[in-house]
Image (tube, rainbow, N blue to C red):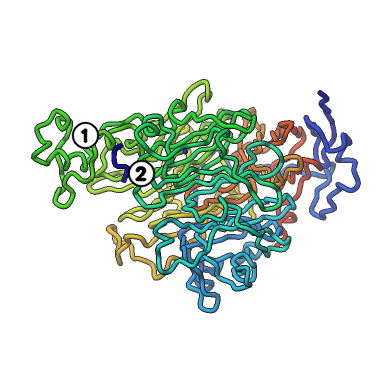
Amino acid sequence: MKKFSFLLIFVVFFLASCGGGSKSGNDADGTDPQNDEDAVNDDDSETDDENIEPICLKPGKGPYALKFTDISEEMGVKKLNALGTQVTVADIDGDRWPDIYTSLASKTRENQNEPQGLYKLLKNVKGASFEDVTFSSGLFAGKDGTNGLASTYVVFADMNNDGFQDAFNAVYVDNDTLSSDTFQEDYSRVYLNNGDGTFKYAGGNFILNDMYSAIAGAAFLDYDHDGVLDLFIGRQYNSYGNLTSCEQDTLMKGLGNGKFENIVDGTSGLETVRADDDSLAKGNFNKPTWGVSACDVDGDGFSDILTSSYGRSYNALYRNKGDGTFEDLSVSSNFAHDDNENYSDDQFFACYCEDESNKETDYCSLSQGPVISCDGIGTSGWDPGFSDQPYRLGGNSAGTLCGDFDGDGDIDLFQIELAHWHIGEASDKSQLILNDGFPEKPLRRLSEEESGISRKRSGSWNDGDLGGFAADFDNDGKLDIYILSSDYPGTKSMLFQQLSDGKFKDTAKDAAAQIPRAHGGAFADIDRDGDYDLIVGTSFMRWASNDTDGRKKPEKQWITVLRNDTGQDANKVIIDISGSTANRDAVGAKIIVKAGGKQFVREVQGAYGLNGFQNDHLQIIGLGDICEVEGIEIRWPDKENSVTTYDKVFANYVLEINQETGLKHHKIEEYFVK
């Protein structure tokens, strides 16, 4: 073995309270929920269908010039000492305003009396400021009532379907952590929301029989459509760089009360084994998973699972078969890695071949020769028969973004990668991956020239891409991509805006959205004006007092809040969606908006990525210059795979869509009361 240093079907036709609609699938009792007096929402902001006045904005043809304004100071970021490499978003108190959690990804406890800013839970005060509710929330309280438990990252979901966001507090614990003098035996826990933005410990460690774990990524999904959210966790090295230390990634089935059970038991199709010669060749080895995502790649209504591996290992795509099991299509789908396996310019290979005992061998005839000093490296960085194999020629993959990037109705992917000049061209770069009919056809990777998602590279370059998100920031109807790149000189965030021809262009600098050493972040409509704003975290790793391009290092790792000043001027559909027979968060629901002879497709997604990415649950779907909506279709992730359609819908209102009670229009300024 070499050294190793993922029947009766009711069709109920009804008039929605603000538009006609039809629903396929079973209602709870077969009755019309619109006529059920107990189901009536008496929200004062509801707009009667007969009195709706169409709102038609005239922005002209998109895309539109993006402009952001830094509102960190007025939101109180420095005053609250809001620091963070990571940011997640959730409405924790049910007031319809997105709140935020920030974290420095620490494994140690916070001091309530003298907090260092290791993490913060901040309530959004109606878009005007943030309020620190970290220790009053109960989210970081131990069983003894003391505050300040360790928190590497937190992701949120309604795990018990009571309408409020519960929390999974992940503490990254590997062997190095366990042997550290500072380790205080805090482990990952679930906290249930009391219904007012405070939390209580769900009781009992739900992960792997009280074991600590190097949980690098977490994604919520309802894999079996039982109406309860499940949790997939990706696990990194237990001993950094040692592939044989990697453990099985795990799918935890939700029991509906904040408790979970492991279903990776030999029959799920998600099983992998410890790395050895055989499992490496087959590709079914435990991988050093960084990011995880869940989305419906094959379009059958069931969420598939994608994992992103560090250490240039295969990425994994597990197709959900819809019967509670999965099949590994990582390699056949073209998702495992790109097709460039040329390692001739890899400097570790070059140094191996520079050794006198290897220099003249046929094996080293491929080497282009080293351009670095091999002193201190020698042959130690290259292992023939291992380092030159496909399972070691992929990327350092941090996460996968899901979205319909080309507008053809199915879910495409964007793969986020770390890459370094000295590893050479075989190392994968961040890349757009299009779906042309998966699984019948493999996924299609676009070159940087084809997609326009590229950057200038020269000298000792590093792509430090660690995360990102896909959203339509200018509301022109096309998804844009925000990449967070960090930890190396000159790295910064990039905002690739989609142009009218489907190609992308980095507009971050012109849009005032370029943040040095951007590490984590989230998008959210902070001010509830109908477009997505940005919250960006910063890393200080490897950042000297001045970066290579002269940027001054901030005093602290304050988050940056950027208000979107463009998207609100275009037409859009704003949807606040919730399930009933589907999970309450409607995670996995597919939204199809039909307008102007086009279809705009979005899928409701929960947490994803490396160390907890999570964005605003509010679905803002840009329409550009189109203001007349022909209809909306919702495909729900429930047992019946129910489909609900609405044929009388108005743009530029908030559409409150509940699977049971239907659709209601609200004026934006009344739904989000300031």
Q: Is residue 318 left or right of residue 197?
A: left
Give x and y (percent) for residue 169: 57, 58
Q: Earlier in the sequence, mark 1 or mark 2?
A: 2
Give x and y (percent) for residue 290: 44, 47
Marker count (numbered): 2
Q: In the figure, 71 relative to 397: above or below? A: below
**SS of the residue at dot 1?**
loop
Give x and y (percent) for residue 604: 62, 42
Q: Which residue, given by chain and number where applicable, does mark 1 sit on?
A: 344
The image quarter in which residue 623 lies: top right
- Quarter placement of the N terminus: top left
Q: CA distance from mark 1 to mark 2?
A: 18 Å
- Badge nearest the viewer, 1 or 2: 2
**SS of the residue at dot 2?**
loop
Name the residue located 21 percent from the left edge and 34 percent from the top edge.
Answer: 344
Name the residue located 29 percent from the left edge and 61 percent from the top edge.
Answer: 550
Q: In the rendered image, is residue 563 in sight? A: no
Q: In the figure, 132 relative to 458: above or below? A: below
The image quarter in which residue 451 lies: top left
Mark 1 and 2 residues: CB-CB less than 8 Å, in contact? no
Three-letter code for the amino acid on which mark 1 is drawn: Ser
Q: Is residue 302 left or right of residue 553?
A: right
Q: Which residue, given by chain and number where applicable, does mark 2 sit on?
A: 311
Q: Nearer the viewer, residue 667 or 119?
A: 119
Crowd around label 2: few <14 · some 14–19 · many ≥20 (10 Å) = many
Q: Nearer the viewer, residue 618 or 48?
A: 618
Q: Nearer the viewer, residue 310 or 465?
A: 310
Q: In the rendered image, is residue 272 in sight? A: yes
Name the residue located 23 percent from the left edge and 35 percent from the top edge.
Answer: 384
Three-letter code for the amino acid on which mark 2 is drawn: Gly
Residue situated furthest bottom in the rendering? 113
Give x and y (percent) for residue 157: 64, 51
